[in-house]
Amino acid sequence: MHEKFACLPGAPARTLITATAGETVVAVSAELDRRSTDRLREVLAEETALGPPALIVDASGLTFCSVSGLEVLIDAARAAALAGVAFFVVAAQRAVLRPLRVLELDRELRVVERLADALEASAAARTLAAEVG
């Protein structure tokens, strides 16, 4: 397992990246607003380019998520799909779920309530791909 911290400059949001053979988890905490989205966009693009089987954004530590933060998640999900990387968002709190639902972005993102759910779904997808392939 590989971990690294990536502090988002000029903003209270922080990220922690954990990578294993099966998936990369980018945990985001505090407030994800316009000031912190550029760095998160860079981190997600870098991790997608590495080609992990799955990229999981653990947003369970967010207390606020702006529209620009949601845009980063949608763009990252689309880029991951083009790269053949499964993409999940972990969120159970109102600060993230409400804007996702109001804007109907939960239809475009695979949102799960717990990190364990995303890890399980990722493992199941890898197993299915191995059986089919």
Image: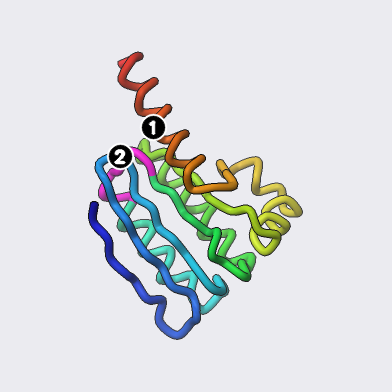
Q: Residues within 10 Å of mark 1 (few under 14, many from 20)?
A: some
Query: Please, what secondary structure does the residue beneath circle 1 have?
Result: helix
Question: Quarter-wise, where is residue 125 in the image?
Answer: top left
Q: Residue 52 location, x and y as percent?
A: 30, 43
Amino acid type at mark 2: Gly
Q: Residues within 10 Å of mark 2 (few under 14, many from 20)?
A: few
- Tell me the residue that label 2 is attached to: 22
Question: Quarter-wise, where is residue 67 in the image?
Answer: bottom right
Badge count: 2
Q: Residue at 59%, 59% (x, y): give it.
A: 70
Query: Please, what secondary structure does the residue beneath circle 2 have?
Result: loop
Residue 95 horizontal side relative to residue 81, left or right: right
Residues in magenta? 48-54
Q: Quadrant of the C terminus?
A: top left
- Reply above or below: 130 against 111: above
Residue 65 horizontal side relative to residue 36, left or right: right
Q: Are marks 1 and 2 in contact (CB under 8 Å)?
A: yes
Looking at this view, name the residue that lies furthest to the bottom: 10
Q: Residue at 67%, 53% (x, y): give it.
A: 100
Q: Residue 94 location, x and y as percent?
A: 70, 60
Q: Residue 11 location, x and y as percent?
A: 48, 82
Q: Residue at 65%, 45% (x, y): give it.
A: 106
Q: Residue at 34%, 60% (x, y): give it.
A: 17
Question: Considering depth in this image, is 45 or 92 the residue closer to the camera?
Answer: 92
Whether residue 52 is in magenta: the answer is yes
Kindly identify which numbered label has been placed on residue 123.
1
Amino acid type at mark 1: Ala
Q: Residue 16 location, x and y as percent?
A: 37, 65
Whether residue 116 is in magenta: the answer is no
Q: Mark 1 vs mark 2: which is more N-terminal?
A: 2
Q: Mark 1 and mark 2: span between their CA atoms?
A: 7 Å
- Reply above or below: 54 against 74: above
